[in-house]
Amino acid sequence: PLSASRGKMGAALAYPYVVWPACLLCCAGGVYNVVYAFGFGYGLSMTLNGVMAFVHFDQNRFKPGDGRAVARIGHMLGYVAYGVRLFVFLYQRQVSSSFSEKAQQTQAKSNTMSLGTKSMISIFVATLMASYHFGVYFHAKSVRRPTTLTWVGMAG
């Protein structure tokens, strides 16, 4: 029991500080091909941002049926759905025969960049993706009731 509570406490202390390193790991493919940071890294980071927020979300703070937990979970699931959709689309495009020439051209351009340049691009994208997490993080921490604009935004 004590070791289990330490594990939960350690995870709680690490979150949200682990968001940036996790996004950096997702975007690390950019050191091979910068498109992997912008594309696959973006999709993976959005998915991971939603999953991390959901795992650490305490819905017990809300009364059942008042919509506040639903709005927050919808926000998190929206991140996950967007990230998965983007990743799958980019993967299908990357492996398609009709895109192979473009993929080769992009790889050739990426090969002309220095490792430092590709690393800085990957770090920039990871930082941007970690900053995207602020919205879902603070929404999950808030106890305010969702506004009409919140529901419209989720529906759109």
Image: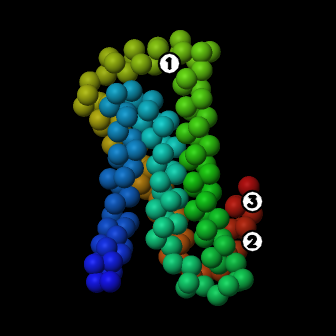
**Of residues 10 and 37, which is closer to you in this image?**
10
* In this picture, residue 103 sits left or right of residue 6: right
- Identify the residue under disc 2: 148
Q: Would you place residue 122 above or below residue 19 in this image?
A: above
**Distance in Å between CA atoms under marks 2 and 1:** 43 Å
Label 2, secondary structure: give it. Answer: helix
Residue shown at the point (28%, 78%) measured from the top left? 3
Q: Amino acid at mark 2?
A: Thr
User: Is residue 9 at all visible to an observer of this figure?
Assistant: no
- Identify the residue under disc 3: 155
* In this picture, residue 70 sits left or right of residue 28: right
**Of residues 83 and 123, which is closer to you in this image?**
83
Label 1, secondary structure: give it. Answer: helix
> Which numbered disc, 2 or 1, marks the residue that appears first in the sequence?
1
- Identify the residue under disc 1: 103
Q: Amino acid at mark 1?
A: Ala
Label 3, secondary structure: give it. Answer: helix
In terms of image quadrants, where is residue 121? top left
Residue shown at the point (66%, 71%) measured from the top left? 71
